[in-house]
Image (tube, rainbow, N blue to C red):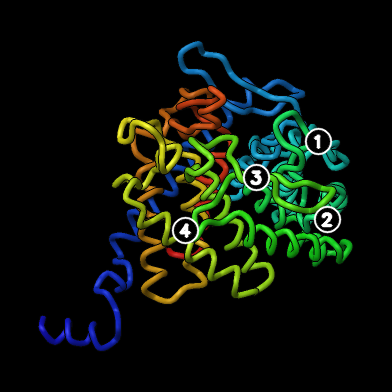
């Protein structure tokens, strides 16, 4: 035994960096299979609750009300995107038919320019559809969606404006916007205008400079003066305070810069992603099950509500970050993601068949300061949960 420890020290390895055991892999493989089967069952149930012209968003367990939104709501792409993930793993034709039907419903969004959320709306949906089918009609919609998103780029601030000017903000740019850059870079590499990539890189570079604190936590929102290009203030809309770390926002940042490294191979994005991961995983307020409270500085911790959507998002990002990391870092990221997935797959967070409005995960939080979507299922929590399960299966089994 002493010899093994000496070898470990000489190799610069922690003993936990040894390869996952066969039993551990078998356990995760079964968990993933079971979760996708649960997803198939739940989403076939949800299909019957979904209005023909709207997309599922949430469910109120107390009232039994199923929440579906108009197609221009920023989450409209997650339902079809989730269906494609389920179809990919189960090959259930009813799931595919519903995925195709829902794509047709949201297709008009390709011309939408009302906010920055085209990536969520159209790449999570049509991007997955094209990946699995190679249907050229889907590709054309992605390219048009990218052109629509590009109209929101503001050269004065080298960023994509998130929301239009309103009574609260002049020109807001939120950290969530990082997630919409993937569609732009993909489009530029697949027949679209090269300016799409330039816009994405410019936005990512600006966000690096403006949104992050010295500890690598992120502000939710930076508001600009378009006349001067100067920052008016740094604030939050969904977090506990301007100085706090809204959990899902930190997840958007981690995922966004990991993705931008994949798309560009620019090492400064990878470095930032690793620093964000370090902030999150070593934060004293991260619970043992690694499902974050809705804000890392939330009042009333440890009694504050959780955000399963943040955990699902972080797990997916950490699994990808592990692909670009040394053995020790990879072990930390994958182990943390595995804990998150196991927690979300347990009775506390995973809905029983036929319950929860057909949604998979319970206990997500949308915007607590706005008294909106508190401790409920949310469609994007399911999307990133299934994406993370797929990534684990593809990369670590």
The numbered mark at residue 104 is: 1
Mark 2, mark 4: which one is toward the viewer?
2
Image quadrant where one finds the C terminus: bottom left
Q: Which residue is mark 2?
A: 156
Instruction: Measure the C-alpha gap from mark 1 to mark 2.
Output: 36 Å
In which quarter of the view is residue 116 placed?
top right
Which residue is rendered at x = 46% and y = 23% of the image? 355
Query: What SS does tag 4 mark?
Result: helix
Position of residue 363 measured from the top left corner of the image (x, y, whole percent) = 43, 31
Q: Nearer the viewer, residue 157 or 312?
A: 157
Whichever of labels 1 and 2 marks the residue nearer the N terminus, that label is 1
Residue 152: tell me if it is visible. yes
Q: Are marks 3 and 4 in contact (CB under 8 Å)?
A: no
SS type, badge 3: strand
Q: Whole-percent x and y of residue 210?
A: 64, 56
Q: Residue at x 40, y 38 (%)?
A: 293
Q: Nearer the viewer, mark 3 or mark 1?
A: 3
The CA distance from mark 2 to mark 4 is 41 Å
Residue furthest top in the image: 63
Q: Where is mark 3, residue-wise?
A: 233
């Amino acid at each position: 035994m002493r010899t093994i420890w000496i070898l470990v020290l000489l190799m610069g390895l922690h003993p936990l960096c040894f390869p996952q055991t066969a039993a551990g892999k078998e356990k995760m493989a079964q968990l993933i299979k079971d979760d996708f089967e649960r997803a198939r069952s739940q989403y076939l149930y949800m299909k019957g609750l979904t209005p023909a012209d709207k997309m599922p968003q949430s469910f109120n367990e107390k009232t039994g009300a199923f929440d579906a939104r108009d197609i221009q709501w920023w989450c409209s792409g997650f339902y079809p995107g989730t269906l494609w993930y389920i179809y990919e793993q189960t090959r259930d034709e009813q799931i595919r038919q519903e995925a195709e039907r829902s794509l047709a419903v949201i297709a008009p969004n390709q011309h939408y320019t009302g906010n920055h959320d085209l990536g969520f709306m159209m790449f999570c949906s049509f991007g997955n559809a094209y990946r699995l089918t190679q249907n050229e009609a889907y590709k054309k919609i992605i390219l048009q969606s990218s052109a629509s998103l590009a109209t929101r780029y503001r050269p004065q601030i080298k960023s994509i404006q998130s929301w239009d000017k309103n009574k609260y903000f002049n020109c807001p740019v939120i950290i969530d916007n990082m997630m919409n850059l993937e569609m732009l870079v993909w489009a530029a590499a697949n027949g679209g205008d090269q300016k799409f990539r330039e816009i994405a890189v410019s936005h990512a570079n600006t966000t690096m400079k403006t949104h992050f604190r010295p500890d690598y936590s992120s502000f939710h929102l930076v508001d600009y003066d378009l006349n001067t290009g100067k920052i008016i203030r740094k604030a939050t809309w969904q977090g506990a305070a301007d100085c706090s770390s809204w959990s899902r926002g930190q997840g958007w940042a981690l995922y966004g810069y990991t993705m931008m490294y994949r798309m560009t191979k620019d090492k400064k994005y990878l470095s930032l992603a690793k620093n964000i991961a370090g902030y999150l995983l070593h934060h004293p307020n991260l619970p043992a099950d690694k499902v974050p409270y809705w804000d890392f500085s939330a009042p009333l911790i440890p009694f504050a509500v959780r955000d399963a959507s943040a955990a699902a998002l972080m797990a997916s990002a950490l699994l990808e970050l592990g692909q670009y990391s040394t053995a020790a870092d990879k072990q930390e990221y994958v182990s943390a993601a595995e804990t998150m997935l196991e927690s979300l797959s347990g009775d506390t967070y995973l809905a029983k068949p036929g319950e929860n409005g057909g949604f998979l995960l319970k206990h997500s939080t949308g915007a607590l300061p706005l008294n909106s979507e508190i401790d409920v299922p949310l469609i994007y929590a399911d999307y990133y949960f299934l994406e993370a399960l797929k990534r684990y299966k593809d990369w670590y089994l």
